[in-house]
Image (cartoon, grey):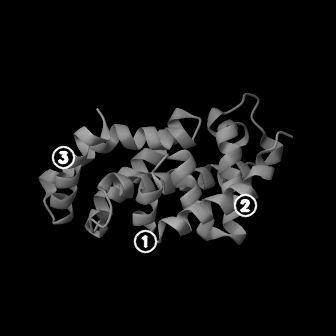
Amino acid sequence: MTDAQDSPDLEGLAAQAAAGDQHALHQLLVEIQPRVRRICGRMLLYPEDAEEAAQDALLLVSTRIQTFAGRSRFTTWLHAVASNSARSTYRTLKRRSAELPTDEMPTAADPRTTSVIAGSRLDFLEALEILGVDHPALVEPLLLRDVQELEYSDIAYLLDIPVGTVKSRIHSARQIVQPLLVPR
């Protein structure tokens, strides 16, 4: 199923759900669940981490659908919600792994904490965290373009900034992030 085939249905369902139609909301959540899982899976290596992020994203959609104003396509808004959920899950997992007592280290690797430590996607997420400290406005455009593969125009609509600004922010972010991704 391509975006062109399912966008009109999703757009209509999203508009109805935003207006308070609970049946439309339920149907929308069923329709977007696979897409949300794919978005989160692009960012988080371990399937259970991606599933946790996807469930959080679906919960956010269900509780905040009324904030979808239709300025951009629903799928663009959804990508931002799911990407932010995956980043939040990453931060939570990172915090959990740091909180493990060192005197009680497990004898076998726990894949939920191991996935936070190894893997190129997670190196990229760590680079995004570093970028966000000094340049928070650069993080979301880079994430939406390079991970979620949204078009520049969609990112501009979503962030309510000109396309030229989107391109400039992505270029600046790539220059800052690239040295952080050099193999050690």
**Which residue is farthest front?**
164
**Which residue is farthest right?**
184
Return the x and y of residue 180 as percentages of the image width and height. 79, 51
Between 7 and 58, the one nearer to me in the picture: 7
Type of amino acid under label 3 = Asp
**Which residue is farthest top?**
108
Return the disc, 3 or 1, that comes first in the chain's sequence: 3
- Mark linked to residue 9: 3
Does residue 59 show up? Answer: yes
- Could you give the CA–CA distance between mark 3 and mark 2, rounded to whole angstroms? 38 Å
Return the disc, 1 or 2, that comes first in the chain's sequence: 2
**Dot 2 surroundings within 10 Å: few (below 14), some, or many (20 or more)?**
some
Q: Quadrant of residue 70?
A: bottom left
Could you tell me if the residues under marks 3 and 1 are in contact, i.e. CB atoms within 8 Å? no
Between 11 and 4, the one nearer to me in the picture: 4
Between 181 and 98, the one nearer to me in the picture: 181
- For the C terminus, the quadrant is top right
Q: Secondary structure at mark 3?
A: helix
Q: Secondary structure at mark 2?
A: helix
Return the x and y of residue 98 as percentages of the image width and height. 73, 52
Depicted 32 relative to depicted 16: above or below:
above
Q: Which residue is mark 2?
A: 130
| Left or right, residue 101 beside residue 147 | right
Return the x and y of residue 84 as percentages of the image width and height. 50, 57
Residue at image location 47% in from the left, 71% down from the top? 161
Residue at image location 69% in from the left, 55% down from the top? 174
- Could you give the CA–CA distance between mark 1 and mark 2, rounded to whole angstroms? 24 Å
Q: Quadrant of residue 165?
A: bottom right
Q: Secondary structure at mark 1?
A: loop
